[in-house]
Image (cartoon, rainbow, N blue to C red):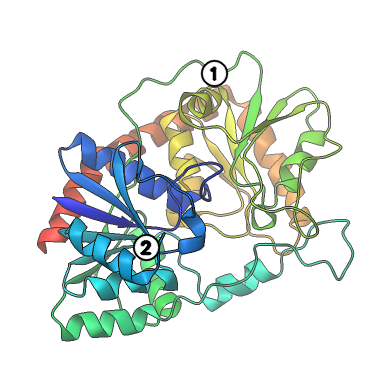
Amino acid sequence: MRVGIVSAEFLRPGVTRIGGFGWGAAHAADALRAAGDEPVFVCPDREALLGAPAAFDEVPLVAKRDGSLAFARELRRARPDVLLSVDYRPSYDSVFRVLPRTPLVIWVRDPRTPDDVAAVAEVRIPGRPAGELPQGLDAIDCTPLRSIVRRSRALRRRVSFASPAPDALAPKAPATYAVDPGRVSLLPNPIDVAREPGPKAAAPRVAFLGRLDPCKRPWLFVELARSFPDVEFVLIGQSHFGGAGSWEPADLPPNVRPAGNLAGQEKLRELDAAWVLVNTSVHEGLPVSFQEALASRTPLLACVDTERVVSRFGIYAGSFAGDGLAALPSLRAGLEQLLGDRRLHERLGREGQEWVRGRHTPERFVAALRALAAGTA
């Protein structure tokens, strides 16, 4: 099976954005190659990949380098059997129109309803001037997908919707995409569960893993650290933005270690060693960081609880608007409980690892995608 993976990011620091969509594209390609299938990266966003090579890790890249006509020719020559759309952005439409009969799978990862958009828009960075708006909060209009689905159905192209968290995210799809998706199937995240995690740190260690962008509210992690001076806090990630409206680690307490963007074994070693993973975002789909942490037997403490993953395998601190500072008492109480009860955090980590191994694996991802492509899911 030849799979065209449509995205505007491919987890290439310095070349593309490095968020969850890029993780999905890169790891989907790895899982497909391991199973004997043929992935092809497809990037319809010309500005996203200017100067990019012809392939990433030997996976061919079809990108809009030389204009729309050349892009369309190269895309047709690639002859994918199915298109895997990593969520949806309006820029993807040029791909869907060039291949109007190729089966299409929309991998619903971060649908944002009007209520979600409003919650994100309320985020503010503490201590900044009232008129300074944080970067990265602008909503992306995903309703043009409606016309793609209508046209596809008229042409009898099969369009399937799938998600790593269908129970939680499927109800958000109609308001996000302005279309009834019908059944939303499970398309798992291909998490590396075959490896055995390394040891936990000898002393308590807490990790944050994600972009250091305002919507993630990383300043809450720093403020939380001030209440636990004897605990090491590791800040893993980097910001997409710079200048006014961005956030960068500064004036950190001595127990906070900024690790920057980590990938591969470096990232996994930090997750293995951590006693707890903290997420302070105002909004998430199902964060890959949750599943990677659980694969490392690391329980969760978070302000979001998609599919009750946090409340099952950690502590849900509750939802808090704006700058999130009101969350700190709840976050402190949750962290005290997780760090102070070794049996609890070991049990939650073990149960979380079992859940990931039973649901989100490369093999299950490939099997589900093949079924979707064949129309048997």
Tell us which disc is closer to us: 1 or 2. 2
Say which quarter of the image contains residue 228. top right
- Apparent side of residue 246 relative to residue 131 in the rendered image (left or right): left
- How crowded is the residue under tag 1: few (<14 C-alpha within 10 Å), some, or many (20+)? some
Q: Is residue 22 visible?
A: yes
- Name which residue lies at 79% across and 42% down: 223
Q: Regarding mark 1 in the picture, which secondary structure is present there?
A: loop
Say if 155 sits above or below 358 in the image: below
Q: Which mark is residue 200?
A: 1
- Name which residue lies at 50% across and 74% down: 113
Quadrant containing the C terminus is bottom left
- Apparent side of residue 212 relative to residue 166 in the rendered image (left or right): right
- Name which residue lies at 23% across and 66% down: 104
Residue where numbered disc 2 is placed: 108
| Mark 2: amino acid | Val
In the foreground, 178 or 170: 178
Residue 274 point in image, percent of width and height: 58, 26
In the foreground, 63 or 295: 63
Asked if marks 1 and 2 touch (Cβ < 8 Å), the reply is no
Say if 370 sits above or below 55 in the image: below
